[in-house]
Amino acid sequence: MNRPQTHEYPAWAETYIKLVGEDVIELLEKQAIEFPDFINSLIEKADYAYAPGKWTIKELIGHIIDTERVFVYRLMCFARGEQHALPGFEEDDYVANAHFSDRSLLSLSEEFAHLRKSNLYLIKSFTERELNRSGTASERQITVRAILFVMAGHIMHHVGIIKERYL
């Protein structure tokens, strides 16, 4: 799959897209296995936050799961030709209302693995025409292809943050 061009996504997406240097489908598949293993290696730090007011590891993983769901909803809508603009989401509010701290890190790891594997069935069904479709989310235009790259890069971004600030 070709990389998305800069006209296919808003400026904020570059942060994530630039991290993806390989076949995005292969990377998404790899993340379905490797990211849960990485999460499971953090069990001793599950409730750790690196500073006051920052998310714990559990909350950060919960944020990643919520964001995966939002991205997949968007790409499904746009691939299917949705013409209505989709709303943004306030990640801090989502985390604050999700009670991730009540869950085990293992359950969050398993949820991510199942979610990503399920999402890959949808993603692999897209034709080139569907990948090129775009829509509006958070008041910005983005293509289905670009969302796939953002999804993969979002995981990479947060793994980097965990390694830099939590470990």
Image (spheres, helix red, strand yellow):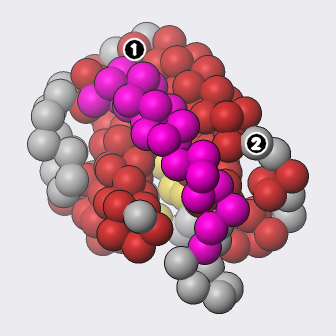
For residue 94, above or below residue 75: below
* Label whose residue precedes the other's in the sequence (2 or 1): 2
Q: Give the quarter of the image for residue 152.
A: top left
Q: Position of residue 163 (x, y in %)?
A: 35, 61
Q: Is residue 41 magenta?
A: yes
Residue at left offset 39%, top offset 14%: 124
| Magenta-highlighted residues | 27-49
Residue at (60%, 73%) from the top-left corner? 49
Circle 2 sits in a helix, a strand or a loop, which is it? loop
Point out the image quarter for the C terminus. bottom left
User: What residue do we see at 58% from left, 17% from top?
Assistant: 118
> Does residue 69 appear in the picture of this structure?
no
**Tag 1's secondary structure?**
helix
The residue labelled by disc 1 is 124
Q: Classify residue 120 as left or right of residue 163.
A: right
Above or below residue 104? Residue 80 is above
Residue type for callout 1: Lys
Residue that extends furthest to the bottom in the rendered view of this protein:
52
Give x and y (percent) for residue 107.
Answer: 72, 33
Residue matched to label 2: 104
Q: Check the image and report above or below for 12 versus 66.
A: below
Q: What type is the residue that disc 2 sits on?
A: Ser
Q: Are marks 2 and 1 in contact (CB under 8 Å)?
A: no
Query: Relative to 156, is 110 on the left or the right?
Result: right
Q: Residues within 10 Å of mark 1 (few under 14, many from 20)?
A: few
Image coordinates of residue 150 in percent, x first then y, are 36, 49
User: What main secondary structure does the magenta stretch of the protein show?
Assistant: helix
